[in-house]
Amino acid sequence: MLATTFNTIVTIGGITILPLLLLSMVAVVLIGERLWFWWRIHQQQRRFMLTVLGAYREDPQGAIAYLKGKPTLPIARIFLNALILPQPTPEEFCLALETAAQAEMPLLKRFNTVFETIITVSPLLGLLGTILGLMRTFVNLNLGAQTMLQTAGVTRGIAEALISTAAGLTLAILTLLFANLFRGLARRQFSLIQTAGGQLELLYRRNYRQPTYSPKPTQPYPDESSDAAES
């Protein structure tokens, strides 16, 4: 069954249709993963950011505990990376936020290189299939007497050229659309992270400038034995 399917695919689209099918399966899997990732981020992160900022104004330790409960969100990891520092200065706090935000960028831009490779390679494979199909057509083309076998070979070559070209261009166009969508979402998410990080930094600077309350040391009770000795 598998061998029959393989032969049918090669007969219809030529040998270049196989790598195109492989690239299309890779693209479908990666696009599905990115769609799930961005849907989950879109559903949770903005509301989560507002909740954390509101909680930090009232109870910083409670906000840290809340952040630890959402380790899958990029903004939670970024905030937590700065808030768990032991008494940082505002400059150190800002540096921790920026470093954590930069560390999350590869996750936001994940698979971009693979998408770019598919976009570039697919039309080239389609063009290669076109050339191979035309070569098959010219090999079977005989301006003299045409037999049924030669006519079938010419038709097959033309079909191979057209199908491989269409498959390569279709795969490249669809992958390009999704890749641009994911790049736009990554830029938008990074802008949101920078905005939220700036708001958290302002709250931290306000708390940092507030004088800390230090109670006066209590006076020790007088020793009763010494009082008795003095009397």
Image: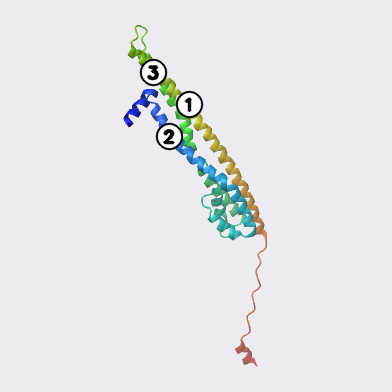
Residue appearing at x 41%, y 19% in the figure: 159
Q: What amino acid is found at the position of numbered circle 1 in the picture?
A: Leu
Which of disc 3 and disc 2 is earlier in sequence?
2
**Residue 216 location, x and y as percent?**
66, 73
User: From the image, which quarter does the C terminus lie in?
Assistant: bottom right
Mark 2, residues whose alpha carbon is within 10 Å: few (<14), some, or many (≥20)?
A: few
Which of disc 2 and disc 1 is earlier in sequence?
2
Q: What amino acid is found at the position of numbered circle 3 in the picture?
A: Gly
**Residue 153 location, x and y as percent?**
36, 16
**Residue 42 location, x and y as percent?**
57, 44
What element does badge 3 sit on? helix
Residue appearing at x 43%, y 34% in the figure: 25
Q: Name the residue under label 2.
A: 25
Q: How far apart are marks 3 and 1 (CA)?
A: 19 Å
Above or below residue 209? Residue 223 is: below
Residue appearing at x 54%, y 34% in the figure: 180
- Asked if disc 3 and disc 1 are in contact, CB closer than 8 Å, the reply is no
What element does badge 1 sit on? helix
What element does badge 2 sit on? helix
Which of disc 1 and disc 3 is earlier in sequence?
3
Q: Which of marks 1 and 2 is in front?
A: 2
User: From the image, which quarter does the N terminus lie in?
Assistant: top left
- Asked if disc 2 and disc 3 are in contact, CB closer than 8 Å, the reply is no
Taking the image as shown, residue 123 lies to the left or right of residue 188, namely left
Q: Distance between the residues labelled 1 and 2?
A: 15 Å
Residue appearing at x 41%, y 23% in the figure: 129
Q: Name the residue under label 1.
A: 169
Q: In which quarter of the image is residue 158?
A: top left
Residue 157, numbered label: 3
Q: How far apart are marks 2 and 3 (CA)?
A: 25 Å
